[in-house]
Image (cartoon, rainbow, N blue to C red):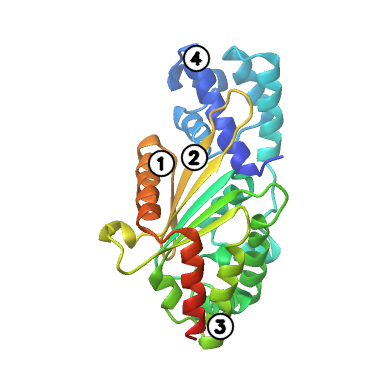
Amino acid sequence: MATPTVLQLQLGKELKRLREARGWTLAEAVEVLGNKATKLSRLENGQSSVRPLDIRVLCEALGATPGETEWAVETARFCNQRGRWSGYRSAYNKSYRMAVDLEQDAAFINHYQSEIVPGLLQTEDYMRVIFAADPLSCDKVDEGVKARLERQHVLTKANPPRVGFVLSESALVRMVGDEAVMRDQLRHIAELATLPNVCVQVLPFRAKTFPPASMCSFTIFGIPSPGKIESLSCVYIEDYDDGRYRDDLDSTETYSDMWKRFVGASVEPAESRKMVLRLASTY
């Protein structure tokens, strides 16, 4: 079973597909539930949940097959899980929790990082320096480290996603902690780069890039969906104290094109690994 976040997104897409196949507007469909159109719009966008009973009524009104209806009702039940972000997992910034769920269900993840090593590639010592230096997380260092180490299991779990990393050279030479921390961190990246599902490329300082785009770190998630439901594609753009998600076609195509340009401008994987090891030897 997928995470509640992904299930909610899948349910929203299926309800929108059924509504459009019926030829109904939001205003027409919302009369079935007796709610405001804005609520149904948020439901279709995966931004809110609704009672399984209401989902059954809506699906039947939209002409869904019995199989489609039962899938939607069962999905709605799992969307309402609570208490998933308690304990050490509460260290996740609220804006990042959706990204954590997307990681777990993704078939592929493409991540561009400009200034620091991405969380999925960080060593524990590197993490501790990052968390301790950040006013937003310095009081939850242990919780943050435990939560991030848990996230990293996605790289080695059964049927892991294909994960691509493009790292700006600045992320590899910017000093975090001391030389021992940096040396171990770069060696760790080189080791992870040998995993069959992980591809690491370095965007060197001398590469021909597009300066405005190169300053923006982002992650693209590709998530398969069951049956007739359209596969999910989502972009997460990270800010210092917040994050933005985009799943509209224009945004996903824009960032996918940006990703391809960065990959094309980067050193190829085998040479990137050698470059990382050379940099490690300088510490």
Q: Position of residue 149 (x, y in %)?
A: 66, 66
Q: Earlier in the sequence, mark 4 or mark 3?
A: 4
Whether label 4 touches label 1, CB < 8 Å: no
Quarter of the image for residue 51 reads top right
- Mark 4 highlights which residue? 21
Q: Residue at x 70, y 15 (%)?
A: 66
Residue 260, placed above or below residue 71: below
Q: Position of residue 76 (x, y in %)?
A: 66, 33
- Mark 2 highlights which residue? 233
Task: Tell me if 131 is positioned left or right of 160 in this view.
Answer: left
- Relative to the observer, which residue lies in front, 64 or 269? 269
Few, some or many residues within 10 Å of mark 4 (<14, 14–19, 20+): few
User: Can residue 127 be seen from the camera position used here?
Assistant: yes
Q: Residue at x 56, y 22 (%)?
A: 33
Amino acid type assigned to the residue bearing label 2 in the image? Ser
The CA distance from mark 4 to mark 1 is 24 Å
Residue 226, placed above or below residue 178: above
Q: Earlier in the sequence, mark 1 or mark 3?
A: 3
Whether label 4 touches label 2, CB < 8 Å: no
- Mark 1 highlights which residue? 252
Q: Earlier in the sequence, mark 1 or mark 2?
A: 2
Amino acid type assigned to the residue bearing label 3 in the image? Val
Q: Position of residue 177 (x, y in %)?
A: 51, 84
Whether label 1 touches label 2, CB < 8 Å: yes
- Relative to the observer, which residue lies in front, 15 or 203? 203
Few, some or many residues within 10 Å of mark 2 (<14, 14–19, 20+): many
Task: Tell me if 231 is positioned left or right of 207 in this view.
Answer: right
